[in-house]
Amino acid sequence: MPVRGGLLLSDREQSGTGALHAIMTALPVGVWVAQVPGGELAYANAEFLSIMGMQPREDVAAGEYASAYSIRDRSGRSYPEDRLPFVRAMRERTTVVVDDIVIARPDGKRAYVRAFGRPIFEPSGLMTHVAVAFIDISAQVDAERAGDVARDRLAAALHHAPVILFTTDHRGVILVSEGAGLASLGYVSGQLVGQNVFDLYRGMPDVQGNLRRALAGQSFTVSSQIGPTTLESFMGPLYGEDGSVSGMLGISTDVTERLRLQRQVTHADRMAVLGRLAASIAHEINNPLAYVTESIRIATERIARLERGADGETLQEVHRLLADAAEGSERVRMIARDLKSFAHPDEDSRSIVRIDDAIQTAARLIAKRTETRARVQMDLSGEAFVHADENRLIQVFTNLILNAADAVSASGAQQNTIRISSSQRGAWAVVEIADSGPGVLESMRALVFEPFFTTKSVGEGSGLGLHVTRTLVEALRGTIEVGTAPEGGALFTVRVPVSTARPPEPAGAASPEPVTLRSRRPRVLIIDDEPMLARVFHATLEADCDVDIALGGRQALDLLLTGKPYNFVFCDLMMSDIGGAQLYAELKARAPGLERKLIFMTGGVYDPRVAAFLESVDNRCVDKPFDIRREIFRDE
């Protein structure tokens, strides 16, 4: 049988028109025709040759096709002859479709084929041939396999990663609820399908508000707190064929653990900073304590001279010495107040803060560290207020100033400079901290904020300071970047959104009026396990008050339960036997109402349980040191 133009033709087919030959040659479908019942080849077009990768075989009959043409199923096994389209179409006497054929071509490639077998009948009804059309569906199979892989990977992600995928209809009824992240909320995949999200989150207006935004057509990313779980979610609308919102899509990630680790890193950095501050703080406290102690010693000697009838100059000297002692005590009090910034818990407690106050506190805390390294120059505007956690803001500037001090030469304190400036630029509070050190290479600027990256020698830096600083700034919706200062060193620029709100004026911001005592004598109980402090309070009040002292909570409980009336009960929170919180609970249980008399005193030692207790009660709390007379007579 001769071959013409890539076609193998029977004698009868060779008598066809040239136009038919051209059409069959141009078809993008492989055509193969065989005689019935033996399966002898009658016709094959060029596309058939292309799909099979070989010439049609004249010597092959029915029952031999699979081996002759290397026809496989998708498992790689030889294709069963009785399922091939020629055999099936001849047997079933109708058009059949087979779509799982794989051709193992001689060139090593594989062709995935969908085949249509159709019997051909003479007018008398006699079946003479079967025509088979072959369509190469390799691209479709590859796409389906890629889709299967993508679906498998998505399913693996949903069932192993802390992710939640959910969709709802336009009323909020959940249609899809999948993902391992559901476990943190107490559910499993599919459990929430059919429930309404507005019923599910009843009593949580923030969450319901986000759901309504998505169903109204908005797309956004939001962080939500659901019980102990923090979710970061993308939410957006789904649209129907008519273009209207038909529901919503949400993808949530459980970031609770990530935030916990971030808090741990922040806390670790805070502890590292405290270690670096220790020498500076000791110096700051020991200096004023030295002259407080010495002033009191000399004042005691001078008082003894006064008792022996010394002159008026000695009295003036006593006043000066006591004033020096008071000034030194105030310096210690201010240092303790600033240091409390690093003793607070990690929870974010935001308020309206003057950004310059945070800068000045940070600079005071590390003054002894910086003054041995460089001259610090400040140019603060005093105008910008921000909504921030003051403690964390102080930590940001402490880290950056310490970083600048470490960057300059240790032997050039007079030549080195650290320049700190603040300003308000539009909606941003901008703080710049520059040093005269060697600067940061441009190739390293993208790395300095990464965790554990440091250019310091082993043991001199943790590599966490700048990473934590960036995390804290970004939590305020701000930015931080590093560049080159005019002095040639590094320039760190912090931008934080300004707040239009202003903090309330502190009580007693104006100069206090002298206390004028009335005729009444309040009855006061001082509860403190520090005898010297209790005696000082007693001495301060005894001229104007009837004062009792209880050296500890147990002794105080006995006094209070006797029924002796007190106008004021000052109680230290941290005592060795019964602390303030426990005394409060005992009084509430045994003499209800008496617990409300307690005015708590604290020296600033942080304990999470004590902080939680103070949040739960309405009692007043004062920080030591304080003017106890003014606390008693402040309303007179």
Image (cartoon, rainbow, N blue to C red):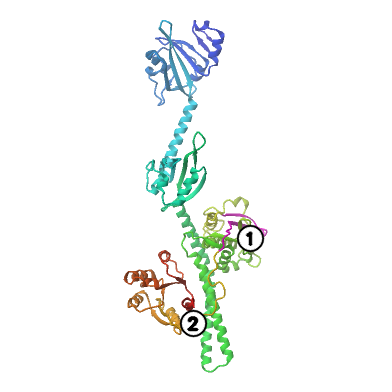
- Circle 1 sits on which residue? 423
Image quadrant in which you'd find residue 87: top left
Q: Which amino acid lies under the numbered mark 2 shown in the image of this protein?
A: Leu
Bounds of the magenta span?
478-502
Total marks in image: 2
In this rendering, the answer to whether 382 lies above or below 538 is above
Number of residues whose C-alpha sits closer than 10 Å to that of mark 1, classed few (under 14), some (14–19) or many (20 or more)? some
Q: Position of residue 586 (x, y in %)?
A: 34, 70
Residue 121 figure quarter: top left
Mark 2 vs mark 1: which is more N-terminal? 1
Q: Residue furthest right?
A: 486
From the viewer's perspective, is residue 167 above or below residue 302?
Answer: above
Inspect this view and state whether residue 235 appears. Answer: no
x and y percent of residue 118 in the render? 43, 14
Secondary element under disc 1, as helix, strand or loop, is strand
Counting from the top left corner in percent of width and height, residue 367 is at: 58, 68
- Check disc 2 and report the residue beneath it: 517
- At 57% from the left and 51% from the top, the residue drawn is 447
Label 2: element kind: loop
Q: Does the magenta stretch include residue 609?
A: no
Q: Residue at x 40, y 47 (%)?
A: 200
Of 419 and 559, which appears nearest the observer?
559
Q: Position of residue 260 (x, y in %)?
A: 45, 55
Q: Residue 477 carries which label?
A: none
* Numbered disc in front, either 2 or 1: 2
Q: How crowded is mark 2: few (under 14 residues within 10 Å), some or many (20 or more)?
A: few
Q: Amino acid under label 1?
A: Ser
Out of 19 and 507, give the one closest to the viewer.
507
Q: Which of 201 and 119 is in front in this view?
A: 201
